[in-house]
């Protein structure tokens, strides 16, 4: 499954936007926040075994993010 995935680092300049997303969503998982934030910026689909948390975060972004359970 990872063959089709792109690994994206967490750039320091993204920290405020991810932090704002987490605050708006009332959550604290920085990794989940970064994944959803990055997916929104790239119009990508999030593949996860925990779609509820990802959808909760995605709902707070202006750009739609597709979340799919794997």
Image (spheres, grey):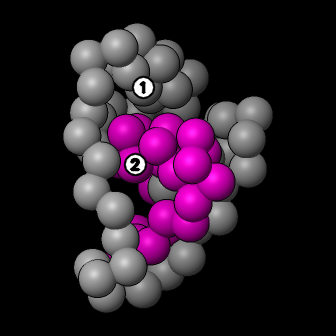
Where is residue 3? Give x, y as percent.
Answer: 29, 82
Q: In this view, does 37 lie above or below 22?
A: below
Is residue 56 something one can see in this rendering? no
Is residue 48 something one can see in this rendering? yes
Main structural element of the magenta stretch: helix, strand or loop?
helix
Quick one: SS at disc 2?
A: helix
Q: Which residue is drawn at 56% across and 23% down?
A: 24
Q: Which residue is drawn at 38% across and 21% down?
A: 14
In this picture, which residue range is highlighted in magenta?
32-53
* Label 2, label 1: how far apart the Cα atoms are: 9 Å
Q: Give the total number of marks visible in the rendering.
A: 2
| Residue closest to the eye, 11 or 62 | 11
Q: Which residue is drawn at 46% across and 55% down?
A: 53
Mark 2 and mark 1 lie on one chain; the one further toward the N terminus is 1
Where is residue 49? Give x, y as percent.
Answer: 37, 76
Query: Residue at label 2?
Result: 35
Quadrant holding the N terminus: bottom left
Quick one: SS at disc 1?
A: helix
Where is residue 46? Give x, y as percent.
Answer: 49, 65
Which quarter of the picture shows residue 68? bottom right
| Residue closest to the eye, 13 or 31 | 13
Q: Is residue 13 above or below residue 34?
A: above
| Residue closest to the eye, 63 or 19 | 63
Q: Residue at x 73, y 41 (%)?
A: 63
Query: Residue at label 1?
Result: 18
Q: Is residue 3 magenta?
A: no
The answer to whether residue 31 is left or right of residue 69 is left
Structural crowding at the residue carrying mark 2, measured as other residues with C-alpha within 10 Å and reported as few (<14), some (14–19) or many (≥20): many
Q: Does the magenta stretch include residue 39?
A: yes
Quadrant holding the C terminus: bottom left
């Amino acid at each position: 499954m990872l063959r089709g995935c792109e690994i994206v680092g967490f750039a320091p300049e993204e920290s405020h936007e991810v932090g704002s997303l987490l605050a708006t969503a009332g959550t604290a998982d920085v990794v989940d926040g970064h994944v959803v934030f990055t997916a929104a910026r790239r119009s990508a689909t999030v593949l996860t075994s925990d779609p509820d948390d990802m959808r909760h975060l995605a709902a707070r972004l202006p750009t739609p993010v597709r979340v799919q359970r794997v």
